Image: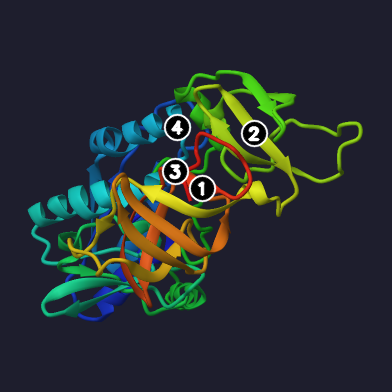
Amino acid sequence: MSGGVDSSVAALLLRDAGYSVSGLFMKNWDEDDGTEYCTAEADLADAQAVADQLGIELHRANFAAEYWDDVFEEFLREYRAGRTPNPDVLCNREIKFRVFREYAEILGAEYTATGHYARLQTVDGRPQLLKGIDTGKDQSYFLHAVPESGFANTLFPLGDMPKDEVRAVAAEHGLPTAAKKDSTGICFIGERRFADFLSTWVRPCPGPVVDEGGNVIGEHQGVAFHTIGQRQGLGIGGRKGAREQPWYVAAKDPDANTVTVVQGNDHPALFSHELRCSTIHWIDGVGPELPFEGGAKCRYRQPDQACRVSKAPDGWRVSFRVPQRAVTPGQSVCFYSGDRCLGGGVIEEVARAALSSNEGVSP
């Protein structure tokens, strides 16, 4: 129980379905860092208030050491290498569906449940991960790296519910979290201004911002502080003779310490027709017959994109029927067959349509 409305309603539904329910509040970040952004104390108070109202016990656990070793250090390595990682994927694999489950078993739990918007079905005695029915809240993308064993004896009470219904149930039962705003911060780190947070751990390294012709038009504070497709915070004003269109990050070169920008939301250099992963995690441990043609997401809440997945000498190649905008190394690509989530992998390289970059791979 995180202190949010989703886990609150999940606990309520399970209690009312006849389960003997206990809550577990996880603290995964040591917040004595002097900032104003940490919310763990307030979240714990909300979780306790819900538990008290539901008449269930609330356990507390501190997994900060595990989070640091298994999630945050990898997060920093990726940023320092110039990529843009997704810590929520790692957090689910390493913390919620490993450390949390192990702790819950020590407490005597027969099942573990979360407030994720996803579904599970059992086929031939094995769990399969499905999208949640609320397409705007479906969280299967963040769960694709969890092994099949992580879904055994797992319950997703909200998978068949839209978010507005979840809030309505919370309000109907007078839960104190009914109107609480959804968290949008980094997994378990809170609602911090991201650039401020990152600069605490990644040393600024100023370098040139260049246009697609290689002309220096500005200065960045470090390639780690920018991501592909970024528009805000580039510090590029109007330029004499330049088109009056916004600038976007199209490429980053950590070795040369340059950030390349282009003008226009639909500039060809922002689009990719292919990407490479060195490894892919298939939830069932086997994966589909190759080459696989199905759907893929390169970011959360993206509609499924038609793709072809094939094995290559340097890993896996994913080709798209329609070029994809702002595909970002370090982020994850997640694969689907209909509503079933098959697995995914970390994007390592992309083939951009119209920009020479160290990020490119051969078509």
Mark pair 1, 2: CA separation: 15 Å
Query: Where is residue 66 shown, x and y percent of the image?
Result: 23, 37
Foreground mark, 1 or 2, reads 1
Distance from Cα at disc 1 to Cα at disc 3: 7 Å
Question: Residue flagged by tag 3: what amino acid is it?
Answer: Glu
Residue 336 point in image, percent of width and height: 37, 69
Upstream in the sequence, badge 4 or badge 1?
Answer: 4
Three-letter amino acid code of the residue under disc 1: Ala
**Residue 328: x %, y % from top left:** 50, 46
Contact flag, marks 4 and 2 (Cβ < 8 Å)? no
In-image side of 339 versus 224 (left or right): left
Q: Which residue is mark 1?
A: 351
Q: Secondary structure at mark 4?
A: helix
Quick one: label 4 or label 2, which is nearer the N terminus?
Answer: 4
* Mark 2 and mark 3: Cα distance apart in space: 16 Å
Q: Tag 2 or tag 1, which sits nearer the N-term?
A: 2
Instruction: Measure the C-alpha gap from mark 4 to mark 2.
Output: 17 Å
Are dots 1 and 3 in contact, CB under 8 Å? yes
| Residue at image point 62% right, 46% down | 229
Tell me, for residue 260, which label it has, or none: 2
Q: Which residue is mark 4?
A: 79
Q: Are the two marked residues, 4 and 1, in contact with CB atoms closer than 8 angstroms?
A: no
- Viewer can see residue 196: no
Coloring basis for residues: rainbow
Compared to residue 361, the image places residue 138 above or below, namely below
Q: Residues within 10 Å of mark 1 (few under 14, many from 20)?
A: many
Q: Quadrant of residue 13?
A: bottom left
| Amino acid at pointer 2 | Thr
Which tag is nearer the camera, tag 1 or tag 3? 1
- The amino acid type, in three-letter code, at marker 4 is Tyr
Residue at the image position 35 percent from the left and 51 percent from the top:
89
